[in-house]
Each structure stands twice: as structure tokens, then as C-alpha cells.
Image (cartoon, rainbow, N blue to C red):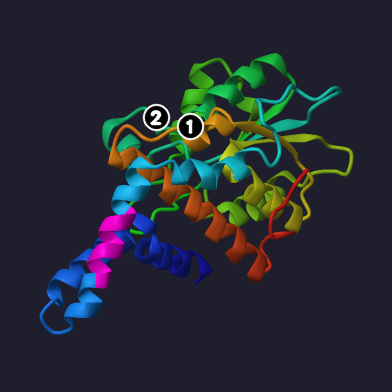
Amino acid sequence: MFHIASKVLFFIFQPSNFAVFLLIAGLVGRRAWPRAAKGMIVAGLGWIVLAGFLPIGNALILPLEERFESHQPALPQGGVTGIIILGGFEDGWVSAGRGGLAVNEAAERLTEAVRIARLLPDAKVVFTGGVGDLFEGAEAGSAVRKYLEDVGIAPDRIVIENASRDTYENAIFTKKLLMPKPHDRWLLITSGYHMPRAIGAFRQAGFNVIPFTVDFRTRDAGDLFRPFGNIAAGLQRADLAVKEWIGLVAYRVTGRSSALFPGP
């Protein structure tokens, strides 16, 4: 229920979608309630223009990305039991139709995991991710497994968890599957903007992991003054950041995270 409700609510209140809904409502109701309709049109159009060009999205995402590591971290000293790759980089819908493994802009989660797996030949390689899309989607676990095997990861090192639909289920189902021991050391690989919520969920699940941040979307604080070159890029960055901030609050309120803004 939480999974469906969260997806529906964010579809409605995702900033770019909500701005369009305001515009439509304003245009439809401009005769019935002209004053309110004018305000809706101005608000909707204003957000599209301002968030599309100005670095609002960067200002929202930068604190998330720098919460744990401001640069790609070094591998921890000592033994590592395994590498956990959070899903979100794979496009199961396209993969199922085209064959192979289709990836999106978060593909660094996978490429960095492969690099680390080669540096740590005894570590398990775990992929956790099912179908998180509200309207369409397909499980990509089998495609991820085949890709890992094709790039040289031994089949007996690979563990696939493909039932989870969100980050909290990633943590719960992966812990149940791996049954980690107190002395185990598991690396958690995910995007910088997503790491706070992911760590909060894993801590709440009682699964102690070591964060390994990848897929940064900003360079540094200088991006607070760098406008976007096109409206679509700015709106996408703002949507991504707002989704994570809403997710942090929702996870804390519903008991799915150990803290409102988990840190190191």
C-alpha cells in the first residue's frame, strides 16, 4: 500500500507535473474563477521557467550528494564481504523488449560495482531491485546477472534480489537473503543524491553497510551559480531532488528510516 500510495502522490505532486496541472486548471477555469486561474497559470509557468533555467535543482541536490562523500570514496581497508548494488540504473521495460541490459543515467552504479568487483575478487556481488514503476515496468534481475557474468564475474559470486519495489524493501529483502553476520563488511553502492535515504533504510532494517557513493550529478558548490542550458534538464534535476527530500520525510514518518537526514 505504501509503495502504490507514494508513487501516485509523487506523480501528482512531482514539481514539473504539478506545474502542468496548475497550467491546465488555470486555462480551463479562467472564466469561472479568473483571479484564481490567473494565479495558477503564473505559478505553473513561473516554476517551469525558473526551475528550468535557474540552478534550483542543483541547490536542492547538492546537500544530498555531500552528506556522505563529496568525492568518490576510496575502498575501505580490510576485507569486504560483498558489494550491494541498488537498482535504479536498469531499464527493465526496454531490456525485456530489446534484449541485453538497457541502462539509464544512473549506470555508474553498475560500472563502478564491476570495477570494484574486479579489485575485490573474493567479494560477493549483489543486485537488489525489482519493479518500482507505477504504470509500467519489468524485472531486470536476469539481465543484470547475465551482464555481470559476461564481464567476467563468476556466477557463484552473484546474488540477485528482484522482488523489492523501493529502497526500504531493498534493505529488508537483501538482509533476509544474505543473512549478514556481525563481522561482515558490505559495501552499498548507490547514487550520491540517494545515499542518505538508502543508508537510513538499511540502518532501520538492522543491516550495517559501508556507503560507497557514485553517480554525482553536481561538480561542487560552484553549480549553485550555474544555470541550465535547457528547461528539460533543469526540471528533471529539480524533480529528482524534490523526490529525495520528500522520500526522506516520508521514510522517517512511516518508520522506514533511522533518521530524518541520515549522515555518516
Q: Image check: 6 left or right of 116?
A: left
Mark identifier at residue 234: none
Question: What residue type is disc 1 on?
Answer: Val
Q: Foreground residue, 17 or 184?
A: 17
The residue singled out by tag 1 in the image is: 144
Q: Earlier in the sequence, mark 1 or mark 2?
A: 2
Indicate whether 220 appears above or below 197.
above
In the image, what residue occupies the spot 33% across and 44% down?
A: 52
The residue singled out by tag 2 in the image is: 101
Question: What residue type is disc 2 on?
Answer: Leu
Q: Image check: 244 left or right of 159?
A: left
Residue at mark 1 to residue at mark 2: CA–CA distance: 7 Å
Disc 1 crowd, CA 10 A, few/some/many (<14, 14-19, 20+):
many
Residue 43 highlighted magenta (yes or no): yes
Disc 2 crowd, CA 10 A, few/some/many (<14, 14-19, 20+):
some
Residue 98 highlighted magenta (yes or no): no
Q: Foreground residue, 243 or 101?
A: 243
Q: Position of residue 91 (x, y in %)?
A: 38, 39
Indicate whether 152 appears above or below 132.
above
Q: Image check: 138 left or right of 165?
A: left
Image quarter hosting the C terminus? top right
* Residue farthest along the right direction in this orientation: 183
In terms of image quadrants, where is residue 169? bottom right
In the image, what residue occupies the spot 63% across and 51% down?
A: 197
Label 1 close to label 2 by CB (< 8 Å):
yes
SS of the residue under disc 1: helix
Query: Over which residues does the magenta segment extend?
Result: 39-47
* Residue farthest along the bottom direction in this orientation: 32
Q: Position of residue 45 (x, y in %)?
A: 25, 57
In the image, what residue occupies the spot 45% across and 46% down?
A: 56
